[in-house]
Amino acid sequence: MTTRRIFLALPILFLGWIAVLLLVMRFTDAAPGAVVLFPGHGLMNNLPNDISILAATPLSITLESQLPDLASRLYAAGAIAVLPAGLPGCLPLPDH
């Protein structure tokens, strides 16, 4: 019974985490970059000139811009899902 609950809870936890990331990116400019999941063919042609492409794979593109409201501009260009990239997270960076 406990294993079954864990297997049911894991997908819900994952979807909740993705939903929080989508909301953070949509309503704040906290992230210095963005990851566009499942980029369409027209997205690259519709990107504003100030957006730089940092990395690209068939499933995602990592982008950055110095101008505000990056997520809104990516959605306007045809992005399906925009997640934050480059957030420092909760843990402090180690000293080197």
Image: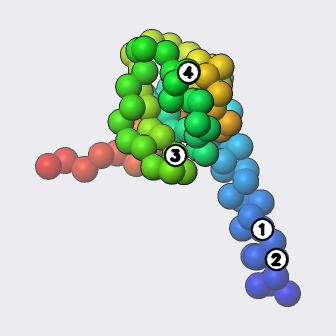
The relative height of residue 15 versus residue 70 in the rendered view (above or below) is below
Q: Nearer the viewer, residue 93 or 41?
A: 41
Cβ–Cβ below 8 Å for labels 2 and 1? yes
- Label 2: state its secondary structure: helix
**Numbered tag placed on residue 46 in the rendering:** 4
Which residue in the structure is indicated by mark 3?
A: 60
Q: Quadrant of residue 77?
A: top right
What's the CA distance linking mark 2 and mark 3? Answer: 32 Å
Residue pushed farthest left?
Answer: 96
Q: Nearer the viewer, mark 2 or mark 3?
A: 3
Label 1 crowding class (10 Å Cα cut-off): few <14, some 14-19, many 20+?
few
Q: Earlier in the sequence, mark 3 or mark 4?
A: 4
Q: Quadrant of residue 40?
A: top right
Please state which amino acid type lies under the numbered disc 4.
Answer: Asn
What x and y, as percent, mark residue 73? 59, 18
Relative to 92, is 18 on the left or the right?
right
Q: Nearer the viewer, mark 1 or mark 4?
A: 4
Please state which amino acid type lies under the numbered disc 1.
Answer: Ala
